[in-house]
Image (cartoon, rainbow, N blue to C red):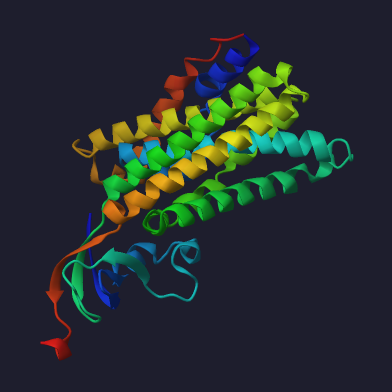
Amino acid sequence: MRDKGIVVTADEDVAQVEVQCFIESCQNCSAKSLCIGQNQSKGLLTARNTLHACPGDEVEIEIPDTKYSRALILLFGSLLVASLLGIGLGSLLSPLLPFSSSVSSLLGLLGALVIAGIVLFRYFKVKNKASLYPVIVTIMKKEEGQR
Amino acid sequence: MELVAIFVTAILINNFVLRYFLGICPFLGVSKKIDSAISMGLAVTFVMTITAAVSWVINHWILIPLKLDYLQIVSFILVIASLVQLVEMFIRKISPPLYEALGIYLPLITTNCAIFFLALMASLRDYSFLESVIFGVGSGLGFTLAIILMAAIREQLDLADVPEALKGAGIALIVAGIMALAFLGFSGMIK
């Protein structure tokens, strides 16, 4: 998905882009404050600034929405599988442990969630840098003072 | 056998969306693309599973022994909101761009009445811990099945010649109604 916006701040390879359409599509939504903040009038996105756009430039950004969906499927899918494995293992091992079945299942669930959390944290640490940030693909209009 | 019955019933017969009409907001709002429907379904299933486990613990280890059953509704709301907040904090920590992209997506889960219904239903039916979790997983997968089917139909509908007046929410509600009728066919499958 592509979107247009204005660069607000730019440091080396990362820029904050004020995205216009967030507001247009959210104008009548009663949950707007949850997304973009009560007093904030425009949506801000952090984008990779490979074209070295400067503050004030009007840019087009590519939002990797398919990658977001896949990342979410991976994230919640693995958390779900881990929690089910944890509960199952806890329940199976309960005769060997000095706890009741429900306590060992709960401990299994907590353990599995912690392990899955650590694995996901390490995985996304690499993934973030690689592909999940939106990218500035075109500088449509340079800020007047920079020409 | 009892666990299998609870699982299958929750997915097909007493499907939260198509039988009880719960969770309609994300069902209609996030069912335009199959990819996003799958991720929403998995997110809801995960939150439902954890909610079933945590609400069972709170109900059986705190509320019932202290005779505070009347606080069930408040406690369950608190459990669901806290869980979603925790998931949100976790996502913000592991992947800031994903967190930014999610927007209203996660709060939609908190306001999903299906999750609250699950916690109340598990308590009313006096399920054991394992039964409660299986009920949570089954209900979540039932929600996922319904939302994926809906997304698949809506993707096809984009190519169909839908009358102008029915485009958007109109045709989506008609499709949901027909799907609910189709799912009625499963009733009586397990006695």
- What residue do we see at 27% from left, 59% from top? A134
Depth order, front residue of A139/B22: A139
Quadrant holding the N terminus of chain A: bottom left
The image quadrant of residue B3 is: top right
Depth order, front residue of B186/B175: B186
Q: Where A2 falls versus A98 (above or below)? A: below
The residue positioned farthest toward the left in the image shown: A147
- What residue do we see at 52% from left, 26% from top? B15
Q: Estimate the x, y position of residue A14 in percent, counting from the top left.
A: 28, 69
Q: Report the label total.
A: 0
Residue B86 vs residue B166: left or right?
A: right
Residue B106 vs residue B73: left or right?
A: left
- Residue B114 is at least partly visible in this image: no
Quadrant holding the C terminus of chain A: bottom left
Residue A48 vs residue B71: left or right?
A: left
- Residue B189 is at least partly visible in this image: yes
Q: Where B91 falls versus A28 (above or below)? A: above
Q: Estimate the x, y position of residue B94 in percent, counting from the top left.
A: 45, 52
Q: Estimate the x, y position of residue B100 in percent, counting from the top left.
A: 40, 59
